[in-house]
Image (cartoon, rainbow, N blue to C red):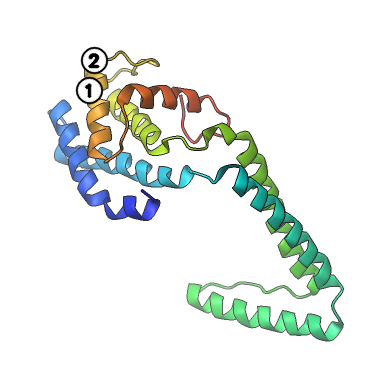
Amino acid sequence: MNSLEAYLQAPAAVARCEAVLADYFPSLSQGVCRLQAHAIVNAVVLAEDLHHGGAAEKKELARLDKQLQKVRHMLCELSPWAQQALLMVRHDHDLARADELRSERRAPQSVPELAGDLMLWIVALRKAEEIHGEGRAGHGKNWPAIAVIDEGRKAWCGNEKKAPPPYLNPGTRLASFLQNLLDACGVDAEVESAYRAWRQYTADPHSPFDL
């Protein structure tokens, strides 16, 4: 499932999660159950975008870095006539875009400034490569399952007024609650393996989850 599919299925998932929350915490109001259900499902939708393409994608990032460097140098070697033409097109585009957004946007005034814009992309690319490389162990993981565990733990903590344990004890009410949330979100995962994965990746410095 990709993020668009997850988004389209979100309303039904919210209703199912709301039912799970109401079943386990009957004292909660419908509004609170719905609010917590939305938080869980939204986390699943966002988690669908945490997957990356592994080594092949890392190679493409490096290739794009080189190409942007090449374009940046080529810009500065153009004739003044060609440079002016580029600036005019960019200026017209930015004016049209600013009109769409109903906000002011300053167009580059020179080719070096335009090349500087490219440098920002290069810096961003290198940061992406750095994070991509250090987070390599996360490739192929069931991030939506980890997201359900993360948000489910938060709901449990708030509703039970005590922190859930760092290690899951099978057969407990917490384990049952989290498994039902996984099923409600349409995430194909066993609660014990999902909990172990959650604990492993909360320790990663690039993890979006907190222990």
- Judge whether residue 25 can be spotted in this image: no
Q: Nearer the viewer, residue 110 or 128?
A: 128
Q: Residue 127, labelled with which disc? A: none
| Residue 87, above or below 58 | below
- Judge whether residue 38 can be spotted in this image: yes
| Residue at 22%, 30% in the rendered image | 180
Residue 69 locus on image (x, y percent):
78, 60
Residue underneath mark 1: 176
| Residue at 72%, 73% in the rendered image | 108
Q: Is residue 159 left or right of residue 80?
A: left
**Disc 1 and disc 2 in contact, CB within 8 angstroms:** yes
Q: In which quarter of the image is residue 38?
A: top left
Residue 27 locus on image (x, y percent):
13, 28
Q: Is residue 104 left or right of residue 144?
A: right
| Mark 2 surroundings within 10 Å by alpha-carbon count, few (fewer than 14), some (14 through 19), many (20 or more) | few
Q: Residue 172, labelled with which disc? A: 2
Residue 162 locus on image (x, y percent):
31, 17
The type of residue carrying mark 1 is: Ser
| Mark 1 surroundings within 10 Å by alpha-carbon count, few (fewer than 14), some (14 through 19), many (20 or more) | some
**Disc 1 to disc 2, how far (Cα)?**
6 Å
Looking at the rendered structure, the secondary structure element under dot 2 is: loop
